[in-house]
Amino acid sequence: MSETGYQSDTLQDFTPEPTEARRVVVLISGSGSNLQALIDAQEHDELGGEIVAVVSNQPDAYGLKRARDAGIDAVALPHREYESREAFDGALIKVIERHEPDLVVLAGFMRILTPRFVQRFLGRMLNIHPSLLPAYQGLHTHARALADGVASHGCSVHFVTEELDGGPVALQAEVAIAPDETEDSLKAKVQAREHLIFPIAVRWFLEGRLKLAGDAASMDGTPLPSSGMRLSHADAAEELDEDAEE
Ligand code: GRF
């Protein structure tokens, strides 16, 4: 630099500001195995952003330990300490916004959300659900699928809207139900697929490829069908080396 402090700026000298990492807040209620899949993806530089906080409405959720072990801000916000759903969601909004997220991820967050909460994060909130939506919204999805004798089941990543488990689907992974399937074996196969597709959907969102566009999800500007993109049983099994285990 010259003594006058003047520096000639050539293009070669120009160093762009590094783009700030996209920020993710993850909400959990329990074990946090999906959170772990997201943490693992981040550690392999495959998440497309950084998990800046994990918030649980259950103070003893194991997922909070997973967050702390990964050096992530872990916040317990017990819903029982609030007198109404509105009051809890208001407090939750404050905690989340303090972390200025680009994306809010629901990873086993077992709370029904108020419309105010959903509107606040509309278009930047993803959930994972253990069924091929729109089939089996709600709870006990594996038992219900088995009781119905359906041939295939799976999981879905979807944008969160005011309809419980009803927002536009981005990505699904399918499981072919085996003749000797039990609820436990089915749950294990579905969860393995959850851990496979959730980090991918998060990355696509953070890269600006996956968006909520009106009533549908869109990928690279193209609206997706109501079932989103779908990974077949065969492709998922291959990714997970499932057939090698049998
Ligand atoms: C997952 O099965 C997910 O589909 C559902 O809740 C469960 C959370 O599991 N929404 P974990 O806490 O990620 O292990």
Image (cartoon, helix red, strand yellow):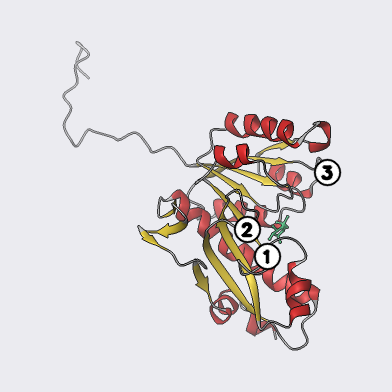
Q: Nearer the viewer, residue 40 or 138?
A: 138
The quadrant of the rendering that contains the C terminus is bottom right
Which amino acid, mark 3?
Answer: Asp
Q: Quadrant of residue 151?
A: bottom right
Which amino acid, mark 1?
Answer: Pro
Neighbours of disc 1 within 10 Å: few (<14), some (14-19), many (20+): many
Q: Which residue carries the number 1 mark? A: 130
Residue 60 in the image: state x and y as whole percent: 83, 43
**Can you tell me whether the CB of the residue at mark 2 lies under 8 Å from the nearest atom of ligand 1?**
yes
The quadrant of the rendering that contains the N terminus is top left
Mark 2 → mark 1, Cα distance in angstroms: 7 Å
Q: Secondary structure at mark 1?
A: loop
Neighbours of disc 3 within 10 Å: few (<14), some (14-19), many (20+): some
Q: Which residue carries the number 3 mark? A: 60
Residue at the image position 34 percent from the left and 33 percent from the top:
17
Q: Nearer the viewer, residue 221 or 241?
A: 221
Residue at the image position 66 percent from the left and 75 percent from the top:
153
Rendered view: 138 above or below 13: below
Residue 124 in the image: state x and y as whole percent: 51, 45
Q: Which residue carries the number 2 mark? A: 128
**Can you tell me whether the CB of the residue at mark 1 lies under 8 Å from the nearest atom of ligand 1?**
yes
Residue at the image position 72 percent from the left and 53 percent from the top:
32
Q: Nearer the viewer, residue 167 or 70?
A: 167
Mark 1 → mark 3, Cα distance in angstroms: 23 Å
